[in-house]
């Protein structure tokens, strides 16, 4: 791009392309939005080409994500998003000139006229959104991939539920259990040495859906505690269709917890920190274990049911 030309000039020319397309399509089909047709067209027509060109102009050259206001430009017209402006230390990533605080208002204005499909269209989302609403929708789109729910280590794998079930079984060696009732025995010979730990014990196949049973050792204040809770492999609105109970006890005493499984959209840490599960202090857990209270032998029983 020649110095002094700049991306904003290209935006104006692209906008002329939109105008020509608008005039051509408005007479052919007055019932639909010309910009919507341009944004969703997959053929080789002028509107699709213009939209693709503008879409490319809206991509940040550093992170390749779509740019949102404020969009900055250098004196030569090269643009960068506000987040990457700090990353490149105010130096244009294209020509290395100082960026300063020049806004590309023309590009921001053109973005307002666009309607684009959700980035998860290939996964099933068929909605179209104004450019500046698209990002907000995608953060909560029900079709967006799920993160791996394995809690024993950080895992960056994402995908749909069937893929993650296979991933948990093959890569994390998580036990799979068919049924809606369970008894799990947790044994630890040196419980005082385990201050902070997390385990995914089992994935249950129940009512044709999957549930993850977690067990945590951590502190609330200065008190060492254990916590068990259930997460649902699906969205929150579906999770609310189910309930579960957990029971732990010994020496003629028991604790019972009843609640609603949390969606795996919430991380295991978020669920733990909200204390939304069965919590038992270490001393009481050792009392339930019997014997000399030096070895943890905790039996966690539970069941899952579907609300009517």
Image (tube, rainbow, N blue to C red):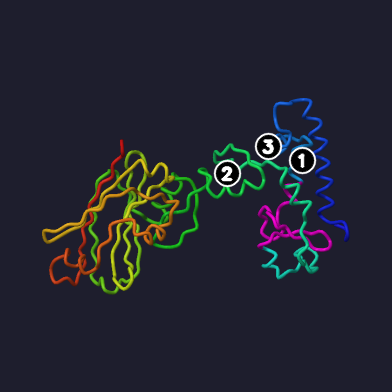
Count every numbered label the image shows and give the total: 3
The residue that disc 2 covers is: 120
Q: Which mark is residue 169?
A: none
Label 1 to label 3: alpha-carbon separation? 11 Å
The answer to whether residue 191 is left or right of residue 135 is left
Q: Residue furthest left?
A: 252
For the residue labelled by badge 3, is the local secondary structure a helix, a strand or a loop? Answer: helix
Q: Which residues are magenta?
A: 54-83
Tell me if residue 77 is in the magenta stretch: yes
Q: Position of residue 187 (x, y in %)?
A: 23, 64
Residue that label 1 marks = 49
State the residue position of label 3. 40
First-in-chain label (3 vs 2): 3
For the point 57% across and 46% down, which residue is it? 137
Q: Position of residue 237 (x, y in %)?
A: 42, 42
What quarter of the picture does the C terminus occupy? top left
Secondary structure mainly formed by the magenta segment: loop
| Displayed quadrant of residue 171 | bottom left
The residue sitting at 79% across, 34% down in the picture is: 22
Residue situated in front as seen by the camera: 155 or 218:
218
Quadrant location of residue 277? Answer: bottom left
Going from N to C along the chain, the mark reached first, 2 or 1, is 1
Task: For the N terminus, give its image quadrant.
Answer: bottom right
């Amino acid at each position: 791009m020649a110095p002094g030309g700049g991306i904003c000039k290209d935006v104006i020319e692209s906008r002329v392309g939109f105008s020509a397309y608008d005039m051509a399509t408005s007479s052919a089909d007055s019932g639909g939005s010309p910009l919507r047709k341009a944004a969703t067209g997959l053929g080789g027509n002028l509107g699709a080409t213009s939209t693709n060109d503008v879409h490319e102009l809206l991509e940040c050259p550093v992170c390749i994500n779509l740019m949102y206001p404020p969009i900055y430009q250098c004196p030569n017209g090269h643009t960068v998003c506000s987040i990457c402006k700090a990353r490149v230390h105010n130096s244009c990533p294209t020509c290395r000139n100082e960026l300063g605080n020049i806004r590309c208002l023309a590009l921001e204005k053109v973005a307002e006229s666009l309607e684009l499909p959700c980035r998860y269209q290939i996964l099933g989302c068929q909605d179209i959104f104004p450019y500046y609403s698209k990002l907000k929708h995608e953060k909560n789109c029900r079709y967006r991939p799920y993160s791996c729910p394995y809690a024993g280590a950080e895992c960056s794998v994402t995908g749909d539920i069937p893929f993650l079930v296979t991933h948990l079984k093959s890569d994390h060696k998580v036990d799979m259990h068919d049924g809606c009732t369970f008894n799990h025995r947790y044994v630890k010979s040196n419980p005082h040495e385990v201050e902070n730990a997390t385990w995914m014990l089992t994935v249950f196949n129940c009512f044709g859906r999957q549930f993850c049973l977690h067990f945590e050792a951590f502190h609330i204040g200065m008190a060492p505690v254990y916590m068990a809770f259930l997460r649902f492999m699906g969205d929150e609105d579906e999770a609310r269709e189910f309930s579960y109970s957990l029971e732990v006890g010994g020496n003629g005493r028991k604790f019972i917890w009843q609640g609603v499984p949390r969606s795996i959209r919430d991380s295991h840490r978020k669920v733990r920190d909200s204390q939304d599960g069965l919590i038992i202090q270490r001393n009481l857990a050792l009392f339930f274990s019997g014997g000399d209270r030096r070895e943890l032998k905790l039996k966690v029983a539970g069941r899952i049911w579907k609300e009517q």
